[in-house]
Image (tube, rainbow, N blue to C red):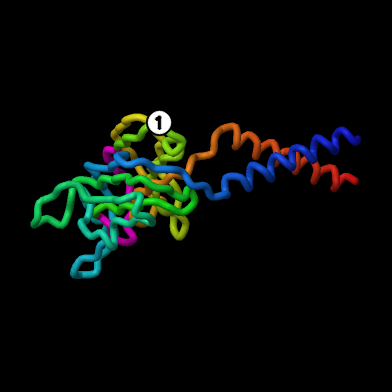
Amino acid sequence: MLSRLMVICFLWFLFVFAWLNPAQAESVHVEEGWSASVSNFSGDFYYPSLDLDNNFSWAYATFCGFHVFADNYLRTTTNVLEPVYMPHEPWSRTTNGVLIDMHDGWVDTASDRVAVWPVMCLDDEWWYHVSFDWSTSWSDSPAANYLTWELWAGTGSSWGVAWRVTPGAGSHQGHVDMDVPLTFIGSPYFVLSLNPVPEPGDILTVLCGLGGLAVFTRRRRRN
């Protein structure tokens, strides 16, 4: 009986440790010359439309690129991560892509990030397809293991990750062509952060802890 109780307590300890540990903020060192980009974005979506006679229908639209409005559609929490629009025509309010330059300094893994909104930053669209290119160039360092590119989209009032890549050190690039479920409502946006995705071992630890908690709760009910 005592040994079983010790096992349950140990599993519970693992659960608490794995649950609390990812939430702890860390600082990672970023070096000059590192970069990341997202470009060639296009998105197709339906949106509700009314004609002059107030007849309802679903209209279809495709938008490409990014708005050249830094205050609204290009945001960073730290000057270490500096987003800049790629070259564009002076008369145009859109651009092909966004480049994130890195400067020497420290980045908080819990709060520092860059957010990039595509050109079709409207409201209440029903998105269903997006495509874009991404790239990263980082030296081999602990910070490279934290680098994450994500595409966020919403389901009503909540938001979640529709696409994610954690490329690591070196030069990497890729093309994404994907459907976004029609339950996703609202404008998607990109997030570059240095917040690592939990490793499978961490997830297993949490599951073990949850299992121990379930056993402990079941035994208490029986007694």
Identity of the residue drawn at 24% across and 56% down: 59
When asked about the image quadrant of residue 179, the answer is top left
Q: Is 176 situated above or below 20?
A: above
Residue in front for this viewpoint, 64 or 141: 141
Q: Is 73 situated above or below 181?
A: below
The crowding category of the residue bearing disc 1, from other C-alpha atoms within 10 Å (few below 14, some 14 to 19, many at least 20), is: few
Residue 71 at x, y = what percent? 28, 62
Residue in front for this viewpoint, 127 or 51: 127
State the quadrant of the N terminus.
top right
Identity of the residue drawn at 74% across and 42% down: 12
Q: Which residues are magenta?
A: 120-134
Identity of the residue drawn at 32% across and 36% down: 136
Residue in front for this viewpoint, 35 or 152: 35
- Is residue 62 among what the camera can see? no
217 displayed left or right of 159? right
Residue 35 at x, y = what percent? 30, 40
195 displayed left or right of 177? right
Q: Residue furthest bottom?
A: 53
When asked about the image quadrant of residue 102, the answer is top left
66 displayed left or right of 92? right
Residue kind at label 1, given as amino acid type: Asp
Identity of the residue drawn at 60% across and 36% down: 202
Residue 65 at x, y = what percent? 21, 48
Residue 167 at x, y = what percent? 39, 33
Q: How many marks?
A: 1
- Is residue 23 among what the camera can see? yes
Looking at the rendered structure, the secondary structure element under dot 1 is loop
Q: Tell me the chief SS of the magenta region.
A: strand
Q: Is residue 57 magenta?
A: no
Q: Is residue 131 magenta?
A: yes
Which residue is labeled 1 in the image? Answer: 140
